[in-house]
Every structure is written in structure tokens, then in C-alpha cells.
């Protein structure tokens, strides 16, 4: 089974569901509270790719340092995750952690729009640097068109529906938010079955690489929030937003026949999704304990 036929509808549904939660006042938050929004976007758009590139080259357990056979493909996959926008599930995690949900929604929406331009630019450089060895090239035009159709359009439709039919939008959102996680679990299960040998062989290095990436980026988010004396709710949201990327988009780009058409590139995103959810669930549990004290 080609995973693209599963991940395409999942990504479209997730983006449509994000649009259903957006309101015009979410974008006014940029002017009302520019500091936490700016910190979150800097963390996602700039720091995350830089940290990922550093981890790939500096850590002894990274696939680059180990000289694994799929090195160029894994590096492209890791950087693809790092360049992706915030995941729509971050809004739910922010709510569970008693964070600033409005800030989370704003950051997810803004990063989804900004990465339309930053992701092609960064990934073009990455593939030019390491992709030649694996004969991997990035068709930037196809990437832009696919992201417009699969991300911007569903978000826009959901946004308009929420403005003019808010009650219907709320009902649809209540249904979609219940099926999003099972759909992602199904996707991960199918990928594991299809590529279990490669995943099991490289899980130690890729799992550690992704874990360090998540911990480093969430730590940077917490540090920036502390230095700028943001509120506890804002700090919790920034930790989650900077640590949770849209793995479904990374998988879609990797598997798409219009772009990379290579499921091996999607393996880092699959492992990232697993480690990301485990780490952030632990973070939510810690916030609940500290809140009670």
C-alpha cells in the first residue's frame, strides 16, 4: 500500500480542522501580544532548523556520524521535519498543559503560512548539499503548489466556514479532533510494517537524534520565555509549539510522487512523531503535577 494515499487525506483533514478553530481575533493577537508570537515563530522557523543541522553533524550517534547507508535520505528527512510548521495537535496539548490556547492557534496558523516560503528555501539548500549522493532533487514549484492545495486551501475553507457557520464548524471540529490521532497512529503502523527492517536497524540512532532535537528545541523555547519573563501559560505553549512539528506534512512531502517520492525520507518524521508525543505527554503530566502543588 502506498502511504501517500493515507497521508494525503490525513494532512488535508488536519489543516481543515485547524481552519475550523481559527477566528479573526487570533490574528489580532500578533499586534496585541507580539513578543510571545515572535519568540514562538523564531523558535520554529529559525532555531529549529539550525539546531537540527547542528545535531546531524555534531552528535556521535547521529546517522551522519555513523555513516549509515541511508545518510543523505535520513538527513533530508530530519531537516524536512525541522522545517515543517507547528503541528495542529499542539493546540490540544496546550489546552491539556493549561497553556495559552489562543497563542497556540495563532502560532500554528502563522507558521503554516510562513513555512510555505521558508521550507522550500531551506530544503533546496539541504538537498543541494547532501541530496546529490542519493540523486535526490527538490522540485520547488511542485512543492509550492502541493502545499497551497493541501494546506492553505483547507485552512482557508475551514476559516471561512467558522466565520459564517460557526455552529456547524464547531460540530465538525468535535468529530475531526477525535479521528485525527487514530488516523496518525494508523499511518505510523502502516509505515512500520512496510519499513520495519530499516526502522528497527536505524531506530537507535534516529530515535536518539530526534529525542535530542525535541529536548533541545523545547528547552530553547522555555529558556527564551524565561529570559523575556513571559507568563507561565505562554511559556508552556512555547515549549509545546516549538517542540511539536507537523510530521504529517513532512511525510506527505517525502512520499509525494510530485516531490521526493521516497518513503525512506519519511522515516525520520515517523520516529519524530512517536518521540514527540511521548515527550510532550510526559511534559503535560509534569505541568499537571506542578499546577496542583
Image: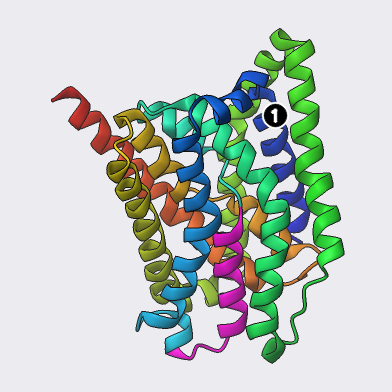
**Residue 1 at least partly seen:** no
**Above or below 151: residue 198:** below
Q: Position of residue 53 (x, y in %)?
A: 49, 73
- The residue at 30%/49% (across/down) is 223
Of 176 and 201, the residue lying toward us: 176
Task: Identify the residue position indicated by label 1 in the image.
Answer: 19
Q: Quadrant of residue 100?
A: top left
Residue extending farthest to the left is 293
Q: Main secondary structure of the magenta part?
A: helix
Q: Position of residue 255 (x, y in %)?
A: 73, 64
Is residue 19 toward the left or the right of residue 83 in the image? Answer: right
Q: Quadrant of residue 216?
A: bottom left
Of 43 and 171, the residue lying toward us: 43
Of 268 and 149, the residue lying toward us: 149
Which region of the structure is painted magenta? 66-84
Magenta stretch containing residue 69, yes or no?
yes
Magenta stretch containing residue 202, yes or no?
no
**Above or below 284: residue 23:** above
Q: Position of residue 218 (x, y in %)?
A: 37, 51
Q: Secondary structure at mark 1?
A: helix
**Residue 281 at least partly seen:** yes
- The residue at 42%/56% (across/down) is 275
Of 150 and 224, the residue lying toward us: 224
User: How many C-alpha atoms fall within 10 Å of the one at disc 1: few (<14), some, or many (≥20)?
Assistant: many
Amino acid at each position: 500500500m502506498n502511504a501517500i494515499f493515507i497521508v494525503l487525506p490525513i494532512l488535508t483533514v488536519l489543516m481543515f480542522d485547524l481552519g475550523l478553530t481559527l477566528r479573526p481575533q487570533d490574528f489580532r493577537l500578533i499586534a496585541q501580544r507580539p513578543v510571545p508570537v515572535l519568540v514562538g515563530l523564531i523558535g520554529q522557523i529559525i532555531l529549529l532548523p539550525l539546531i537540527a543541522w547542528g545535531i546531524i553533524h555534531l552528535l556521535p550517534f547521529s546517522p551522519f556520524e555513523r555513516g549509515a547507508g541511508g545518510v543523505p535520505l535520513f538527513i533530508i528527512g530530519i531537516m524536512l521535519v525541522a522545517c515543517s510548521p507547528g503541528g495542529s495537535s499542539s493546540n490540544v496539548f496546550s489546552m491539556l498543559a493549561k497553556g495559552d490556547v489562543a497563542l497556540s492557534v495563532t502560532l500554528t496558523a502563522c507558521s503554516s503560512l510562513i513555512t510555505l516560503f521558508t521550507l522550500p528555501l531551506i530544503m533546496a539548500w539541504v538537498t543541494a548539499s547532501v541530496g546529490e549522493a542519493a540523486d535526490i532533487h527538490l522540485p520547488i514549484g511542485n512543492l509550492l503548489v502541493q502545499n497551497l492545495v493541501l494546506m492553505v486551501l483547507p485552512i482557508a475553507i475551514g476559516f471561512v466556514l467558522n466565520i459564517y457557520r460557526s455552529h456547524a464548524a464547531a460540530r465538525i471540529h468535535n468529530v475531526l479532533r477525535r479521528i485525527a490521532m487514530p488516523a496518525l497512529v494508523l499511518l505510523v503502523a502502516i509505515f512500520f510494517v512496510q519499513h520495519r527492517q530499516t526502522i528497527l536497524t536505524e531506530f537507535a540512532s534516529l530515535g536518539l537524534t530526534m529525542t535530542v532535537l525535541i529536548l533541545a528545541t523545547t528547552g530553547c523555547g522555555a529558556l527564551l520565555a524565561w529570559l523575556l519573563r513571559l507568563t507561565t501559560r505562554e511559556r508552556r505553549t512555547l515549549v509545546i509549539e516549538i517542540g511539536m512539528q507537523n510530521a504529517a506534512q513532512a511525510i506527505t512531502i517525502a512520499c509525494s510522487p510530485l516531490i521526493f517520492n521516497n518513503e525512506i525520507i519519511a522515516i525520520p518524521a515517523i520516529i519524530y512523531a512517536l518521540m514527540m508525543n511521548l515527550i510532550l505527554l510526559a511534559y503535560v503530566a509534569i505541568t499537571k503535577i506542578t499546577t496542583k502543588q
